[in-house]
Amino acid sequence: MPHRPGLSFRFTHAITRTPADSVADGIRAVDTGSPSGAKFRAEHELYVKALETAGLTVDVLPPLEDFPDSCFVEDPAFCLPEGALQLRPGTASRLGEGQKIRAALERRFDTVIELPGSGHVDGGDVLMLDDIILIGLSARTDREGADAFARLLGDWGYEAAVCETPEGVLHFKTACSTLGDGVILATRTMASSGFFGSRKVVVVPEGEDYAANVIRVNDVVLVPEGYPKTLAAIEEAGFAAVVVPTHEARKVDGGLSCLSLRFAR
């Protein structure tokens, strides 16, 4: 696909969802304690404020108690300037989230298309760059879903590549992010994968792998609180950074990117 400068980080809008109290029952790979709904909502308000300060109009959807993980709105959908794609999360308890977020997508997009077939894709496995969209296979995204998604993106004029996510990585974007301008932030394992070609890769310092999940939003990079070495590495690479707390999200395998759908209109 042609290089589209800023496609991966120049945004005007975002969609988020307020965490429900049931987030305490959210999915997690390792149990490090349950998040508090009240504390999570307080952190979420700071997250929304950071998006707004970065220049976005933010739609904040109400909590869904029947769906503990529904505040992670990035997984059931993917947004491009041309329209929104309703995905099919790879965990049974999350399958209804796509329909719950569809009305919010339709308010912002004339075109909303559902992922064809019966395969699964979590948005957390999709890394959008300015010249290609990478789709990582994982426990949540299978080959059938990834291939169907790649074909659909191709129909819209986007190049997509399906990647074998390294073992032990929950979502592709758990271990990497785009800082924009052709620069990638990645864990050491992901940096050595070969997925990023000749792009510059900023390697996350040892012991701070969680901080590989950041989001570039217009002129700033949002970075999770508590990872000073990664923050310094991002700033040394020439990017302005804003620290945002994600302590409650981390307890249910959540990070900065999965808490919003970001797009340009």
Image (tube, grey):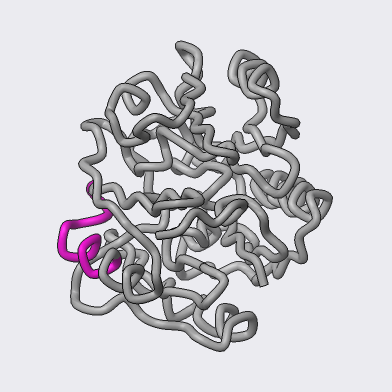
- Quadrant of the rendering where the C terminus is positioned: bottom right
**Going by the picture, which residue comes out furthest to the left?**
144
Q: Is residue 141 above or below residue 236?
A: below
Say which of 160 and 75 sits in front: 160
**Magenta-drawn stretch contains 215:** no
Position of 51 with respect to 19 (left or right) is right
Q: Position of residue 263 (x, y in %)?
A: 61, 64
Q: Position of residue 225 (x, y in %)?
A: 66, 28
- Quadrant of the rendering where the N terminus is positioned: bottom left
Q: Which residue corresponds to the image point at 68% horizontal and 48% vertical from the top-left?
A: 217
Which segment did they paint magenta? 138-149
Say which of 3 and 123 sits in front: 3
Q: Which residue corresponds to the image point at 25% horizontal and 39% vertical from the top-left?
A: 165
Position of 7 with respect to 265 (left or right) is left
Q: Is residue 184 above or below residue 55?
A: above
Q: Which residue corresponds to the image point at 67% horizontal and 17% vertical from the top-left?
A: 236
Q: Is residue 218 above or below residue 200?
A: below
Q: Is residue 55 visible?
A: yes
Position of 71 with respect to 95 (left or right) is right
Q: Which residue corresponds to the image point at 35% horizontal and 59% vertical from the top-left?
A: 159
